Image: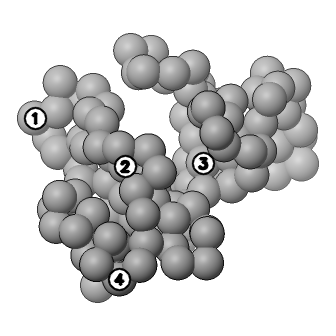
Amino acid sequence: MQRVIHFEIYTRDPEGVCPFYQDVFGWKFKKFEGGPIDYWLVTTGDDKDPGINGGLARPREGQSPGTINTIAVPSLDQSIKKIEQRGGRVCVPKMEIPNIGWLAYAEDPAGNVFGVIEPHSTAK
């Protein structure tokens, strides 16, 4: 079974939203260097406790503010095929995230957007 391992919050004002989540929930933010976009890593708690961490970024072209969950898969290419075979579509094509893995964004048949990532220790 493949699980949600990451969330992303999209906002037009990342610097303005970070203090909100820090003050309300105690989350910590650290700017991720070397990625394809400005991105802040979100730590929501201690790794030994239940829950997931996430990210915060400006919406990409064609995206609206909101939250997206990302699901870890053993093969991104195979998952993309299954998504398309079952009526979904890839809305942001496969891309490499340095030192993280291969990532794409897709829509289910109802238009809900989600991320799909193949974690890869040799990603550059």
Q: Which residue is mark 1?
A: 122
| Side of 118 relative to 7 (left or right) | left
Q: Residue at x 81, y 51 (%)?
A: 25
Query: Relative to 122, is 84 above or below?
Result: below
Quarter of the image with the C terminus in it: top left
Q: Are marks 3 and 4 in contact (CB under 8 Å)?
A: no
- Circle 2 SS class: strand
Residue 106, picture quadrant: bottom left
The label on residue 86 is: 4
Which of disc 1 and disc 2 is earlier in sequence? 2
In the rendered image, residue 72, in percent from the top left (x then y), is placed at: 32, 63
Give the Cα distance between marks 1 and 3.
23 Å
Identified by mark 4, the residue type is: Arg
Of circles 3 and 4, the one toward us is 4
Q: Which residue is mark 3?
A: 8
Q: Residue furthest top?
A: 34
Looking at numbered disc 2 in the image, what kind of residue is underneath it? Ala
**For the point 55% across and 34% down, which residue is it?**
41
- Do callouts 3 and 2 mark residues in contact (Cβ within 8 Å)? no
* Mark count: 4
Indicate the secondary structure of the residue bearing disc 3: strand
x 41%, y 21%: residue: 35
Quadrant (top left/top right/bottom left/bottom right) for the N terminus: bottom left
Which marked residue is nearer to the observer: mark 2 or mark 4?
4
Q: Nearer the viewer, mark 2 or mark 1?
A: 2
Mark 2 and mark 4 lie on one chain; the one further toward the N terminus is 4
Q: CA distance from mark 1 to mark 4?
A: 30 Å
Q: Which residue sits furthest left?
A: 122
Name the residue nearer the viewer: 42 or 96. Answer: 96
Q: Position of residue 37 (x, y in %)?
A: 51, 21
> To which residue does mark 2 refer?
104
